[in-house]
Every structure is written in C-alpha cells, then in structure tokens.
Amino acid sequence: VWRQVGRQATVNSFEEHGESMEDAVPWLEDHCVTWYEEERFQCVHAGIRKEPISENDFHTLVHDRKSVKENIYHGKLTITGHIALEMPVWFQGNQQSKVLEYDRTYPLPEYGVICVDTGCGKGGLLSAMVIEDDQFQMIYE
C-alpha cells in the first residue's frame, strides 16, 4: 500500500535532502503517537475496537476500516479518518449514522465514531472538526 500512496515521493525527498530514512525512525518514535485521548473524546488515525483505547493493537489504530464500514463501535466518542467519505459522518455504533453538515453546530456525542476524512488527498475537501465545550462544527477548506 505504501508504494501506491506516495512511497517514491517520500524516498526522493529524503534523498534530495541528503537524509537517511532509517535515521528518521528515532525522531518518529519520539514524536508520533498512535492515539490521543481527552476526557470527552479520543482520536485515532483509522479504527478502534476495544476500550480502553490502550487495549487496541497498532494495526487497528492505524489501518482498521471496520469502525466505519461495520458501524459497530459504541464506546467513547472516537474521531478518526483513514476512509475517505464524501462528507463527515457520525457512525453511532448501532448501524445508524448521520451525515454532518458543514458550518452547523452539533452537540458533542458521547459515543461512536466521527470520520472526518473527506478525501483531500484525492481531490475532495480538507475537513476539520472544531470542538468547543460540549459542541462541535465541521469546517472545510
């Protein structure tokens, strides 16, 4: 998959700057996390299957698609990406979902998955979620 999504561009960039990809590994390990958690919500790149979030393996957090595709996670609200959708969607975990309109204020849910990936790398919009107090808005560029 890495080859299909820009591997050569990454390799070329390292070479152009006279750097070794292997030398970057310690920096990445020190500065990158596989998940982020607040009291009201948590964030992962791809998916979640278990609570607490620390019980999920690396593959689930970085590559999983089931949280969105199967819509069965009903735990603590998790913000995710990884699967490009036309619009941001709240997957409620009970086979129900809600498309989230831009520039509209919503109450922050307590459970489920909100996928904010709208395919900016493939010609779609760059979407962001702005959370303030107990409310949020989806915005785009």
Image (cartoon, grey):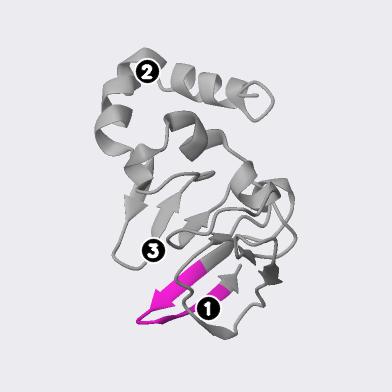
Task: Name the quadrant containing residue 118.
Answer: bottom right
**Does 107 appear above or below 51?**
below
Q: CA distance from mark 3 to mark 2?
A: 37 Å
What residue do we see at 60% from left, 60% from top? 93
Per the rendered image, the range of residues in magenta is 129-138
Q: Residue at label 1?
A: 137
If you read the primary sequence from the N terminus, does the residue marked by circle 2 or circle 1 appear first? 2
Q: Which residue is mark 2?
A: 19
| Disc 3 target residue | 41
Q: Secondary structure at mark 3?
A: loop
Split into 4 quadrants, where in the image is the C terminus? bottom right
Count of picture labels: 3
Q: Which of the two discs, 3 and 2, labels the residue nearer the N terminus?
A: 2
Q: Residue at x 29, y 65 (%)?
A: 39
Q: Nearer the viewer, mark 3 or mark 1?
A: 3
Question: Which-is-in-front pick, marks 2 and 1?
Answer: 1
Residue 96: tell me if it is visible: yes
